[in-house]
Amino acid sequence: MTAISITTLLGDIRACTVCAAHLPAGPRPIVQFSATSCIVIIGQAPGTRVHESGIPWDDASGERLREWTGLPPKQFYDPAVVAIVPMGFCYPGTGTSGDLPPRRECAPRWHDRVMAHLPTDRLTLLVGSYAQERYLPNAKRKSLTERVRDFRDHSPNILPLPHPSWRSVGWMKRNPWFEADLLPVLKGTVSTRTRSVGRDQIGVISRLTSST
């Protein structure tokens, strides 16, 4: 795919208003990717802070996710290295027990088009139940804990993770294998993938994507 076609797709996504009538804060799609994104993070949907800043994972959950992956902010926010493609690109609003689920219209409309631009050997991090239920076969037959515990069934190209919200702190205490077994694999795999992206390539693609 050419840089122009990626730029066009990004522009189409950022101009999307398909769900506008259902978004209390209005549409503001949050997404990043490039032709060399060797890691894809598929989470839920932006929260209020991310909606306000326009920066993906710009909150405590993002800090915890960067700690889990070992990615410094400079790499995490470089689309030449990391694609951030949530299940819902816009903040969905708040319900009775927290943020509402990602809008169902979003992933079917955009994900396949985005993934077509990415390297085929990318590492995909499925963060939370919504992403896992879309991308893992038979995911609904297992709990999130079971899906994450069985991470070896999908690595080295796919790793399921819990959502790194404040709730994950207690979850990690109840499931010490996550820190002992999965996180070393996650950090090692991420480090290997990021080394495969050359410095010159990173600079060129970053300039192209940041200009959109």
Image (cartoon, rainbow, N blue to C red):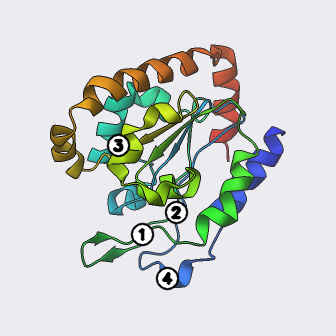
Vertical order, 63 against 102 (above or below): above
In the picture, measured across the screen, residue 142 lies left or right of residue 139, that is: left
Q: CA distance from mark 3 to mark 2?
A: 16 Å
Comes first in the chain, label 3 or label 4: 4
The label number, if any, that marks residue 22 in the structure image: 4
Front residue of this view, candidates 79 and 68: 68
Classed neighbour count for the residue bearing mark 1: other residues with Cα under 10 Å, few (<14), some (14–19), many (≥20): some
Q: Secondary structure at mark 2?
A: loop
Q: Residue at x 22, y 38 (%)?
A: 175
Whichever of callouts 1 and 4 sits on the residue coming sooner in the sequence is 4
Of the residues under marks 1 and 2, which one precedes in the sequence?
2
Q: CA distance from mark 1 to mark 4?
A: 12 Å
For residue 88, the mark is 2
Q: Secondary structure at mark 4?
A: helix
Q: Quadrant of residue 199?
A: top right
CB of mark 1 within 8 Å of CB of mark 2?
A: yes
Amino acid type assigned to the residue bearing label 4 in the image: His
Q: Is residue 38 left or right of residue 60?
A: right
The Cα atoms of the two marked residues, 1 and 2, are separated by 8 Å
Q: Is residue 87 visible to us here?
A: yes
Residue at the farthest bottom position: 21
Q: Nearer the viewer, mark 1 or mark 4?
A: 1
Tell me the tag on residue 62: 3
| Amino acid bearing label 2 | Gly
Q: Quadrant of the N terminus?
A: top right
User: In the rendered image, which quarter is residue 99 located in?
Assistant: bottom left
| Residue 107 drawn at (x, y percent) | 61, 62
Q: What SS does tag 1 mark?
A: loop
User: Of label 3 and label 2, which has the lower sequence position?
Assistant: 3
- For the residue labelled by badge 3, is the local secondary structure a helix, a strand or a loop? helix
